[in-house]
Every structure is written in C-alpha cells, then in structure tokens.
Amino acid sequence: MAFASGSSSGAMSDINVTPLVDVLLVLLIIFMVTAPTLTYPIDVNLPQKSLNPPPQVKEPPPPIRLRIDATGQVYWNDAPQPMSVIQNLMEVEVNRDPTNQPMLEIDTNPDANYGVLAKVLAHAKNAKMEKIGFVQND
C-alpha cells in the first residue's frame, strides 16, 4: 500500500483541517455574539390583577336552528319562513339581549343554491348576530 509505507521521504497526502476548524470556530463565535442583536423585543400586554371580579356569565339562550333545503326554502326552528322576514327574526333575537345572543346554527343541504346561504349570512351580519355556526345534520 502506498499510504501505509513508513518512508518519510514521500509527500504528506492528508488534508490539514486545523485552519478550517479555526475559521469555523471564529464564525461560530461571531454568530453567537451577533444573534442576540438580531432579535426584536415584542411588547405584550399581560392581564393585570383586578379588584373587581368578572361578571357572572349568563346561561346562553337555546340555539336557533336555521335550515336551508335543496329547493332554497329557509326553515327557522323547523318552521318555513320567507327570506324577507329572516333578518327581522334575527334582529328580534339580537335585541332581546345583545350581550347574550343565541347561537345561529346553519344547516345547508349540499344541493342548495349558494346564493340563498349568502343572503342568510348577509342578513345575519346586518342584524349584528355574533355567534354563527355551521352544522351538518344527516
């Protein structure tokens, strides 16, 4: 074997990695020193201790079941309603207690027209309903 010969007259064929390790250690130290300056502080408003206890949470009213069938008919708690009165029904529910609104659970048939659902959601927004959920009843 040419590399295993014990003669010292041949040129050394091993790579000297000492300078490479020195350069890497210097780069590591530079990155360790500059890394903390690259971070930016984020102001976080933590909750403070309050002397007044929070108000008691009221029991939420029962949810409103709004169903849209494949023909586009809208049912308000299983009673068919024309689209023209849906917003009025929503406003009545919101005005009962604006801070404790019922959940509007919308169930839409997969074959229903999307325009009907869009109108229902627009009526809910105009009536200022805050709790809207989508359910899938089979």
Image (tube, rainbow, N blue to C red):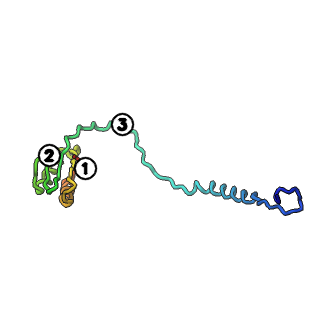
Q: Earlier in the sequence, mark 2 or mark 1?
A: 2
Task: Give the percent coordinates (x, y) of residue 131.
Answer: 25, 48
Q: Earlier in the sequence, mark 2 or mark 3?
A: 3
Q: Nearer the viewer, residue 131 or 75?
A: 75
> Label 3, label 1: how many angstroms apart (C-alpha)?
39 Å
Label 2 secondary element? loop
Q: In the image, which is nearer the foreground, mark 2 or mark 3?
A: 2
Residue type, numbered disc 1:
Phe
Choose top left, top right, bottom left or bottom right for residue 110.
bottom left
Q: Nearer the viewer, residue 92 or 2?
A: 2
Task: Give the percent coordinates (x, y) of residue 47.
Answer: 40, 43
What's the mark number on residue 51? 3
Which quadrant holds the N terminus?
bottom right
Label 1 secondary element? strand
What's the mark number on residue 134? 1
Residue at point 10%, 50% (across, down): 80
Report the label total: 3
